[in-house]
Image (cartoon, rainbow, N blue to C red):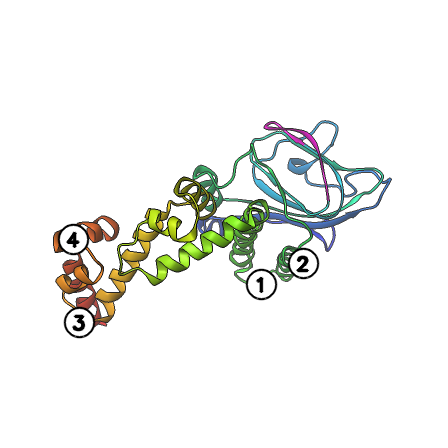
Amino acid sequence: MHSKNIKYFHIGAPDEAWGIVVTTVGRQLIPAHSSYPLSRHPESYIFDPGKGRVLKEYQLIYLPEGSGYFESGSCKRQKITAGTMILLFPNEWHTYEPDKDTGWLEYWVGFRGVHIDNRVKNGFFSPKKPLYHLGFSSAIIGLYEDILTHAAEEKSGYQQLISSIVLYILGLMQFMYRNETFNDSFAIIKINEARAIMKQAIDENISPKQIAENLGVGYSWFRKMFKKYVDVSPAHYQANLKFLRSRELLDTTDLSITEIAYKLNFESVGKFSTFFHKREGVPPLIYRKQKSDFGRQS
């Protein structure tokens, strides 16, 4: 620990087993016209902005104040402004530094583990997109401050707590960035209206094309914007709603499988069974029996 605002951690086997660990956390104010970085760091973290560096971990660096420059192996040198979040990747060369005329305030947290590896593997994060302009966020600052506080206290289980806060920051970052960049308010209004219609008409067979027509928009535009914002097509979203409704009916009512199939407007019991089996892994009859057996055991 180099100061009360900078900390590096010893990681034990139980911490690694959690699936994500925090390796370092810190906060540092870099005044205008000062050298950078101000603090000395362990050998594996030594940083010369002129040469850059390669880390063996991920880092999230948030800049609520000031401006500067960033460059990495996958991202050309560019200006970054207050409110930017930088995501550094392991084994990826990078460099960054504050503008001499402005300086900056930086928060950082380093981490590694299968939980973040899987998110990168599944395309949520990429070295080709290391910068997220989120604007000033007291919520994000508060989360970094929480990590610093728990790290200073070092109470039992603090690694599991602070590493889970990192996952929350990643989720919040995705949420804020996506809603900030999807600035078509007309599309968002129509998508929300469509989702409301779908939820109210789960028991009906209203098609996405009919929904688009009811909303007064073209189907191809509606499908494209819906998938861009929600991540799945309108038809997939509807199918998931119907699946959740079918499971609710199986769990909370005495309706027969046949009655549920026709209540949800399936053409036949067989089609309902296939639909349910594909999503749950077992047919509706087996699902209900398993639930009933579990209830008796408990």
Amino acid residing under circle 2: Ser
The mark nearer the N terminus, 2 or 3, is 2
> Which residue is denoted by mark 4 in the rendering?
267
CA distance for labels 4 and 3:
21 Å
Residue in the picture at 14% in, 62% down? 257
Q: Is residue 84 left or right of residue 236?
A: right
Q: Can residue 236 be seen here? A: no
Describe the element under mark 4 as helix, strand or loop: loop
| Label 1–label 4 contact, CB within 8 A | no
Q: Position of residue 108 (x, y in %)?
A: 66, 47
Q: Quadrant of the C terminus?
A: bottom left
Q: Position of residue 265 (x, y in %)?
A: 21, 57
The mark nearer the N terminus, 1 or 3, is 1
> Which residue is denoted by mark 2 in the rendering?
138
157 up-or-down from 55: above or below = below
| Label 2–label 1 contact, CB within 8 A | no
Amino acid residing under circle 4: Glu
CA distance for labels 2 and 1:
25 Å
